[in-house]
Image (spheres, rainbow, N blue to C red):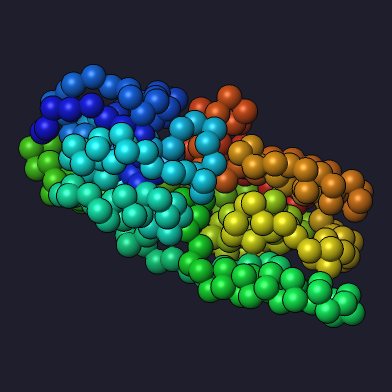
Amino acid sequence: MNVRRRLISATAVTAATALGLGALSACSSDSAATGNTDKFDVVASFYPMAFLAEQIGGDHANVTSLTEPGQEPHDLEISTKQRAQLEEADAALYLKGLQPAVDEAVSQTGIKTKIDAAGLTTLEDHGSTEHDHEGEEGHAEEKGHAEEKGHAEEEEHARDPHIWLDPVKYAEVAEGVGKAFEKADPDHAADYKKNTAALVEKLNGLNGEFENGLKDTKTKVFFTNHAAFGYLAERYGLTQEAISGLDPESEPSAARVRELQQEAKADGVTTVFYETLVSDKTAKTLAKDAKLKTDVLDPLEGITDKSRGDDYFQVMEANLKALQAALGAK
């Protein structure tokens, strides 16, 4: 293995440390972290990729994340230093389509092992929830609405990258990452295979918990801040209605807000979910106007002190409990 320092990059390289479910300290370190080692050096783009690398790489991998804890992954920009560090890594693990800056940096680097998680499972088009605007608001506003609608339609055809929130798809990605590690670092292939199998077994167990916990509920509809939970909803027979689309920073129209208020009454929606890394202002305003509760449904794009758990599994368990409460699980 190359002897070098690791970085935190928005493009992702896979690596790992320990199959345990404790906090991922290596993933949470800053970009200048980690001294020289002779381990399999993996740069991961953001938390879900770093978690896979940590779990599968175990003691043989040195994993760093390009995205800092608490940083919104979509906003990541790659520094010159990170690009240089990426060049020195043994592998990069990332999710193409989620972080454009990472996609560009990885494509330009000469790193031998580039692992794109999006190519290890099937991505789908869950689309935007932004609907047409009302047409009687004046020519100037119509022009702005037309532009916004065009943006929404463009987003509608974008593939949804949030595959890690579906334990089944995440397990498929894990298996692909494991095989890539085995090929890139054959001396430790047996351990990577064993670690991958253990992780997939845990993910299968988590899938079973969600299936059993959400099969009998009063309502199947839940409201979220942005459309991160399309795969999860599809997997467990639920309907996600997002205030914004796939972009967490996009603002909903007044028509969309009115529509959600009406739907809440029709479908027995009790709760508007918001998340830890994005402003909760819009979600709480909608909840107040529609007389609904608010709660956290974590898209797991990063672990912070505000997270309801120290790792992927703990936060997903918290998400399950939040959904059960909001949907009226019996």
Instruction: Kindly identify the residue that appears in the image at 18 percent across and 21 percent down.
Output: 36
The residue depicted at 64 percent of the width and 42 percent of the height is: 278
The correct choice, above or below, for 243 with respect to 14 in the image is below
Along the line of sight, the residue nearer the viewer: 204 or 152: 152
The percent coordinates of residue 227 (x first, y second) are 62, 58
Outermost top residue: 35
Q: Is residue 46 left or right of residue 307?
A: left
Q: Give the vertical position of 141 relative to 229 (above or below).
A: below
Residue at the left extreme of this rendering? 187
**In the foreground, 109 or 184:** 109
- Quadrant (top left/top right/bottom left/bottom right) for the N terminus: top left
Q: Position of residue 239 (x, y in %)?
A: 68, 63
| x 32%, y 38%: residue | 80
Nearer the observer, 204 or 151 = 151
Nearer-the-camera pick, 77 or 28: 77
Asked whether, in this view, residue 25 is left or right of residue 165, the answer is left
Asked if residue 59 shows in the view, the reply is no
x and y percentages locating residue 306 in the rendered image: 62, 28
